[in-house]
Image (cartoon, rainbow, N blue to C red):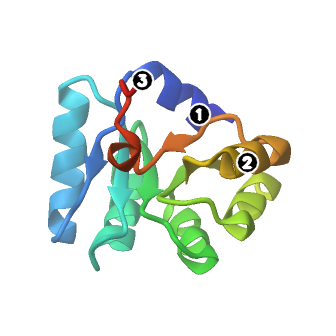
Amino acid sequence: MEALKRLGSCGVVPVVVLDEVQNAVPTAKAMQAGGVDVMEITLRTKAGLDSIAQVAKNCPDICVGAGTVITLEQCKQSVQAGAKFIVSPGFDREVVEWCLKNNIAITPGCVTPTEITVALALGVNVLKFFPANVYGGLFAM
């Protein structure tokens, strides 16, 4: 999946929360001018889906994805709006299976051994360690 390659090569994926749709394209263009061509727009606000659509339409060189996707309906709406990848805060088998079936990059939030092994068994090869802070962060030993 092309989106996963782009995510892997960018080093950091900015998580963008937009309250106003009119800020989506200027934000994407500013990020691109600064050398960042990947962005995850969250669905935490009412502007999320429309912001994804505006970036997908007006900034074709930006790999835009949807974050905080918690239902299959949100997932489908995000892809229809132009999202190239989906990020969810947890593991939802229905969302993961739909994304895999439709060749959409999916990064589900996983922390337990069960979530991780089920995701891997389904063919997911990139996981989001979330919520990392609850489990001691990235450097817990």
How far across and how far down the image is residue 80, in percent? 57, 68
Q: Who is closer to the viewer here, 138 or 99?
A: 138
Where on the picture, by quarter, is residue 67? bottom left
Q: Say whether residue 79 is left or right of residue 16.
A: right
Badge nearest the viewer, 1 or 3: 3
Which residue type does callout 1 highlight? Leu
Q: Mark 3: which secondary structure?
A: loop
Answer with mark 1 or mark 3, whichever residue precedes in sequence. Answer: 1
Which residue type does callout 3 highlight? Met
Answer with mark 1 or mark 2, whichever residue precedes in sequence. Answer: 1
Badge nearest the viewer, 1 or 2: 2
Answer with mark 2 or mark 3, whichever residue precedes in sequence. Answer: 2
Question: Is residue 118 shown above or below 35?
Answer: below
Residue bearing the label numbered 2 = 119
Q: Who is closer to the viewer here, 1 or 67?
A: 67
Residue bearing the label numbered 3 = 141
